[in-house]
Image: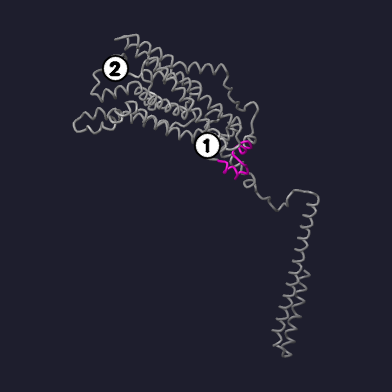
Amino acid sequence: MADSQSGEARLPVAQLEEARLAAAGLEGARPAAAGLEGARVEAVGLNETRVVDARLKQTRGADAQRARDATFRGSETPAPDRKPPNRRGAADPVKALMHRHRELCERAVDPLEIAAGLEAHGVTDRTATRFRHRDVFSLAEEMYARVPRDADSAPRPEAPDTPGARAGWAVLALLPGTLCAAAVTGLRLTEGRPRLAVTVAGVLAVALGLRAALRRGPLHATRAWQTTTSTRTWICWLLAYALLGDGLLTAGIEGGPDGPPTGGLDSPWPISLAAVLALTLACAPAAWCAHLLAVRARRKLALSRGLEEFAASVKPLLLGVFGLFLCALGGLLALCGAVLGEPAAYAGAGALGALLLLARLLTVHGFTRAPAVILAAAGTVETAALASVFAGRLPGLSDLALPVESLADRWGPGAVPALVCGGAALVLLIHATRTLTRASAHATHGDTP
């Protein structure tokens, strides 16, 4: 009510003022009055702006004072309108690596298994420096320590190789050689059909003995790394060539053979019983050499502080174990040749034994592809060598047999398996020096990817 009355009171005054100005002839003063009114409004706005700025300065000063007080009191609580920066990813790179290899960290029973797994996935000492560690081993130790584990549900390491278990696989390693010696003795003491029965029974017995020897001990491969059927077939073919190949090649070059082998001194082509007997007896030294390599390599893995250091220490061990087996195989070849009155066949049988040992070592430690390819290639080349001799008898194909005949005439029939198996063993040896010197090849359980 008061506002309306005051408005009504101001209205006649404004009209009187306008009438007075009109009567006095001062119409030109209206723009000046309007300018004065705008200046007054502008001055009022300027004053309000100054008041707002003053209030903002007071607010900022109060916020700064509160922040100084909070810092002085040691408070770590941030301001309510500010969020703390997220630095988890940049400050903890190991956590991201642990998340990436979570399954490996959870199932590992010691830091060495994590180190082997990281190395198998391509993590090197140089890569470990990006995670603020000097090598893979120290990185694995931190990852193992940070994995939450329950004391009751944590996996426990397997029991070490006890003397009883070692005696078990040592006896099984002697089984193939023992059965082969019994079969050879039966062949020498029988004739005719009984000799054929002894041969069949001896082959089956030796095959079962080899299977038993490879199912336990250092030569045993896990189910995921067992040899395939085709690889077993090529191994059987290589052993058959060691038994019959040299005699069949000689008979083929001379125009034979005139009949099947009998195993006796009057056989249409000779059989290398000494070579096969020595190879089966070599299962025992092969098992001991594989055991020596595994034990010494794991010991060096526990003492090494870098992947390059471990590889440099394991390579001489691998070559030493390989040389030790060759010496043992050479002694067995000499012994069997002297007992049976046959040539020792050091080159052919020795190269085959080296090839089979390297192939088994690689298979046991998880590298199955290279042995399968190399064994198949060696068997194929030996088959082609035999086939070329007999194909050279066909009209117009005599040139096919010239390379093999020239090699056999100069170095003997044993030169073919020596060159084939020796070259294949050399390739596997080079491959083994690059793969069996990795930490991942000597994990605790042998199942690290």
Q: Which residue bears the numbered disc 2?
A: 261
**Segment colored magenta:** 124-142
Q: Where on the picture, by quarter, is residue 183?
A: top left
In the image, residue 275 above or below residue 190? below
The Cα atoms of the two marked residues, 1 and 2, are separated by 50 Å
In the image, residue 59 above or below residue 143? below
- Residue 307 position, x and y percent, is 56, 37
- Residue 205 position, x and y percent, is 40, 15
Neighbourhood count class around disc 1 (C-alpha, 10 Å): few under 14, some 14–19, many 20 upward: some
Provide the major secondary structure of the magenta segment. Answer: helix
Magenta stretch: includes residue 37: no
Which residue appears at 80% of the width and 52% of the height? Answer: 72
Which of the marked residues, 1 or 2, is nearer the chain's N terminus? 1
- Residue reaching furthest to the front: 410
Which residue appears at 56% of the width and 26% of the height? Answer: 295
- Residue 137 position, x and y percent, is 60, 37
Contact flag, marks 1 and 2 (Cβ < 8 Å): no
Q: Which residue bears the numbered disc 1?
A: 120
Secondary structure under badge 1?
helix
Q: Amino acid at mark 2?
A: Pro
